Amino acid sequence: MANNPAPAPSIPGISVGVSSETGTLKRLLIHSPDRGLGKVVPSKAQDWLFEDIVHLDTMRRKEYDYYVKLLLYFLDPDKIKGKLAAINDDPTRSFFIPGTDKYFASDCVVDIQRLLGEILEEESTRIKLTAAICGIERCSYQVQEELGKFDAHELARIFISGSCSDQRMLFAPLPNLIFTRDIGIVINDHILLNKPAKNARTRESILAQFVFFYHPMFSHIRQNIIEIPENERHFLLPDDEKASDYHRCTLEGGDVMMVAPGHLLIGCSERTSIYAAQQVMKVLFEKNVVQKITIIKIPKKRDYMHIDTIFTQVKRDVWVLLGTLARLGDEARKKDVLHFFGPADANKEFRILQFEKGQEQQPREIDNLEDLLTEISRIDLGVTGPIRFIYSGGNEFPYGEREQWTDSCNLLALRDGVVIGYDRNDKTLEAFKKERFKVITAKRLLEKFEHNELSPEDLTDTFITLPSAELSRARGGSHCMSMPLLRG
């Protein structure tokens, strides 16, 4: 066990505040693909919530690293400006790895692994977290003793990847931690910690708890951290009722969107239960954090997973969405001679209810997604001009569903009108171009930044494309791969 005194925290208490989906992004949590992703085997891929095994080196070097470089250029340019050539030529990738001498260590683009390593420098925290992890992973006492021999940052890697640097696997990896959106969500100046639906993500929620409650970065807002209470009699429920939406308490961040200062969206999906949505609504109204909550019930299908897989916001007046779950979905299918291949009842389980503080017993039903998003833009955000919708795959069958599967609707807004998404969704990119958006690859844009041909402030109405052959296999896009902590 390390006995050295804990070093001074590298990130002191910071401002936390998110009240929109498109305000200028100033700070976020991410997690770069770790060695655990390279340990996913076909027989366990679906149990660990992956559709396929990925080529880790390609995912890191040729895809996700572009994401990190873009984020740094927009949020913390001093960390990367003038360094691209050296970064690209370094075979060790030490620039991207927390705990190494050359790590970028930004206070704006923050890897949760870095924060985990920093709290593990403190001995009492290390003992508590090691015991918690070993308990849920059913480790032997000998393994628990062995974990005490690693330095803090290597221990953080082990807790996340499940494996040691010598390739030994101690427990299952956490391949889904690259989707940091799901561990928590900032709602105005509060942080809502989530409760994952699948056992494969239980360790993620424990790591997140320790980071948010123990790291000095969040110490000054600890009273604003919200945990959803479990059903108080859950241990008495029969197994079939524990699996029911009306009794289980599960919530993931992809189902929560802070679209305006007083308005929160919560999706009820295969990952977020009705019971959890009710508990969140009760807590947030009691604390007066928001005044309006809209519940969006979507079909429990792996295709959709979370509400941010079927729509995200691009600008105050522009949204990208899946046509088959929108007002125009049925019309598009009727026009297509191949419509019989499409889902006939896509809207059967789709429902939107809006609740206002003090009037919880009198929800208002909203007919369709476009009406809801139009209301948000007009009423909550004060847009006076036309509201534009860009549909996945141009709302053409079968491209809408095909490209939604590879995250055409899952975009991260760096600021109003400037978004990051995958390069493989050709029909969706064509639809963006028709709405007068510029499309540029991450590689080309970084080159322009580095050679002073452009700066991030110059960009308007721009779709930045990430290479995505491997990232898209993980079933999550740039929105999923971010947990915004601060937007302007």
Image: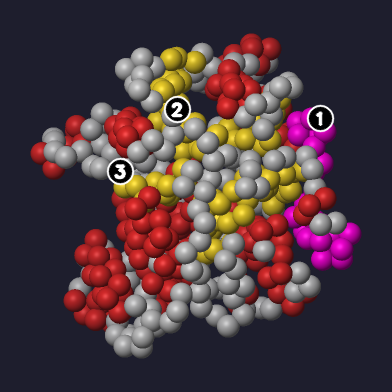
Disc 2: which residue: 292
Residue placed furthest toward the right:
453
Q: Nearer the viewer, mark 2 or mark 1?
A: 2
Q: Residue furthest left?
A: 236
Q: Residue placed farthest to the bottom in the image? A: 4
- Do the numbered discs 2 and 1 sit on residues whose CB atoms are within 8 Å? no
Residue 49: x, y in percent?
42, 49
Which circle marks residue 434 in the picture?
1
Residue on which disc 3 sits: 228
Left or right, 276 with reference to 220: left
Which dot, 3 or 2, sits closer to the camera? Answer: 2
State the extent of the magenta-drawn residues as a range: 430-453
Of the residues under marks 1 and 3, which one precedes in the sequence?
3
Residue 447 on the magenta segment: yes
Q: Quadrant of residue 57?
A: bottom right
Say left or right for 430 vs 41. right
Label 1 to label 3: alpha-carbon separation:
43 Å
Residue 18 on image: x %, y %: 53, 45
Amino acid on which disc 3 is placed: Ile
* Three-letter amino acid code at the position of disc 1: Lys
User: Can I make out residue 255 in this image?
Assistant: no
Tag 2: residue type? Answer: Lys
Label 2 secondary element = strand
Question: Does residue 293 belong to the magenta stretch?
Answer: no
- Residue at image location 25% in from the left, 65% down from the top: 132
Residue 362 x, y percent position in the rendering:
36, 15
State how far apart marks 3 and 2 are (Cα).
18 Å
> Is residue 455 rendered to the left or right of residue 346?
right
Depicted 369 relative to depicted 443: above or below:
above
Quadrant position of residue 214: bottom left
